[in-house]
Image (tube, grey):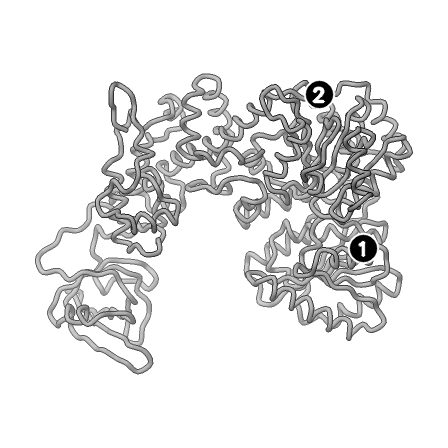
Amino acid sequence: MARKDGRAVDLNTQSLSSLPGVGPRVAEKLAARGLLTLQDLWLQLPRQYEDRTALTPIRALQPGVAAQVEGTVEAVERGFRYRPSLKVAIGDGSHATLVLRFFHFRAAQVAQFSPGARVRCYGTPRAGGHGLEIVHPSYRVIEHESALGEQLDPVYPAIEGIGPASLRRLIGLALDKLPDDEALELLPRAMRDSLRLPSLREALLTVHRPPRDADVAALLAGTHPAQRRLVLEELLAHHLSLRRQRIALQQHRAPALAGKGRLAERLRDALPFALTQAQHRVFEQIRHDLAQPHPMLRLVQGDVGSGKTVVAAMAAMLAVEAGKQAALMAPTELLAEQHLNNLRGWLEPLGVRVAWLAGKVTGKARAAVLAEVASGDAQMVVGTHALMQEGVAFNDLALAIVDEQHRFGVHQRLALRDKGAGGRVGVDAVVPHQLVMTATPIPRTLAMAAYADLDVSAIDELPPGRTPVQTVALSAERRPELIERIRGACAEGRQAYWVCTLIDDSDEVVAQAAQSTFEALSAALPELRVGLVHGRMKAIEKQATMRAFKDGTLDLLVATTVIEVGVDVANASLMIIENAERLGLAQLHQLRGRVGRGSAASSCVLLYQSPLSLLAKQRLETMRQTHDGFVIAEKDLELRGPGELLGTRQTGLATFRVADLARDAGLLPQVRELADQLLAESPDIADRIVQRWVGGAARYASA
């Protein structure tokens, strides 16, 4: 950052075209990877390091251990038997020989390797036909004595169209323009000192140009103090951006639903089951939020079958009692319809009008529902994303409930919120309270990072009487036994699922796998009614098959993982998951949750292909040991990391440049403290930290 007229001038936004060698074509290639400014290059961190500060005698080389050697060319051989190849034998004073092998080379390269030429090269040796060899080493021919490097060489993620040496040069030029400490630093010194972390400038220079005595193991593990410094600021920026959105939302007004709660009590008393302690606790948290004159934004997470819908229905009754409306939006028509049936069964006896609005409600029926919603006669409105379409106007929406929120885009949640504001979104707009539900338990550490703008409640207790699902892992060779097991279960009047999974394959291939499994099982079990559901089918066909299974007119449902979320078939007691080793724990747990919904003993069979990797063994063992979604989520985070667990689509959480939530979760409590301190004492610094790391992406991060 340079100083001009006594004010700080940000170099962060300076375009890369200011660097020598960055013309329009190079700029375009860098931009394709999101590298637009000097700061983007500062934060383009090495993925590994090469130690060229010393030479290793050829005799001391070890297979698999990267090293730098220097030797004299002893022999050169070109071959063309299968494909062009070039072998160069070099020797040194340790009286040993190393072969350098190339498959891609030009005539000029061959000419460089004349016998007697001196070559310095770097690479990872492996066992070859005649001793050790290095395939495609990085090398240079040395004509005079050449000094060794003073620091470790960074290796950056590859960028198409830009060679490693060019990229290293550009990042070096960008680093030469790093402002001084005072101009670059945003974190107060006392804060850094208390955490024993270097300044930002020092951290960047250490990570890009580590001294020869640097702790390489810590750098490669991402735990070096210089990296922790960068991680801390990035996590802080994301946390602050979410918190600022929350603060912005709290500026709006919302209807204070502070009634006596008689309608919610009548609903609770009429239920054919008693609420669990966890349900009571979470309802009280929601009730407290709804009584405030600013909008609630609460996430309720709980395992499949923990009773989130009942709690949401009781919350909706607080809105209805106040003479206002509540809406519940679900991602699929079948799931929305399931909510509709439950809510009608619970609420209509209390005199509450429940309306249904989905894509298939058309013509006069749709016009009638829209009129009820607009007049306020419909007190509870259930539907799919059809609730957010133009033409849907609420009379007085006070509570918007979103089920399985990660299946909706952020824009869709914003749209439902804005419906309640009557389309007005100024600070003085009255917006509805928002209640978000998910059956995908999220580890506490991740929830702290991903949902800093939400209050998080957990229904961490299952209703009594739920029979735990017995889980077994079987090798795929035992398929024939399973087919007999399905025959037996269906003969007793039960139903079964057979889930086909293929990873990293197109929908086409998965659909084909499901299709062929469907055909094989139909042939093996001619007496059973077998249905098929996969992602390539039209929505209307999928819905019809799922409904037939729910109604009991199908015995066995062959499906892809599209059935993961939500459908409740109490009579299904057997779940078979093929290629279970290829799925993450959270997904396996969701699928297993489709059975064990009734009183019958239920089983989940995890069919796997041998041999199992260590990771797959750990996953299947975890599934056998526990049914607790929160324990499974923590284990999933440990085994897979947060990227897969959350996915940016699922949370709106931006992808991180340097932070790794699984590795860096321990910093989150400090991040929260620092965020509180900055928001209270230095809001302008908080703004600049967000701008540096998140920029404009903050707007929709968690609407």
Q: Residue at x 61, y 67 (%)?
A: 609
Residue occupying the far top of the picture = 681
User: What residue sits 46% from the left and 25% below the top?
Assistant: 674
Q: Residue 651 location, x and y as percent?
A: 58, 40
* Amino acid type, mark 1: Arg
Location of mark 2 (residue):
255
Residue indicated by mark 1: 547
Q: Residues within 10 Å of mark 1 (few under 14, many from 20)?
A: some
Vertical placement of 276 versus 147: above or below? above
Q: Percent from the top left, x then y, of residue 583?
A: 61, 56
Q: Residue at x 51, y 27 (%)?
A: 672
Residue 664 x %, y %: 47, 39
**Total marks drawn?**
2
Res. 369 image quadrant = top right
Which residue lies most toward the bottom here? Answer: 81
Q: Given contact means CB atoms under 8 Å apart, are the residues at marks 2 and 1 in contact? A: no
Q: Identify the secondary structure beneath mark 1.
A: helix
In this rendering, the answer to whether 72 lies above or below 288 is below
Give x and y (percent) for residue 447.
Answer: 58, 36
Q: Can residue 520 be seen in this snapshot?
A: yes
Identify the disc placed on residue 383: none
Element under disc 2: loop
Q: Which residue is nearer to you in this view: 457 or 250?
A: 250
Observer-nearest of 33 and 503: 33
Tell me which label, 2 or 1, sits earlier in the chain: 2
Residue appearing at x 28%, y 52% in the figure: 50
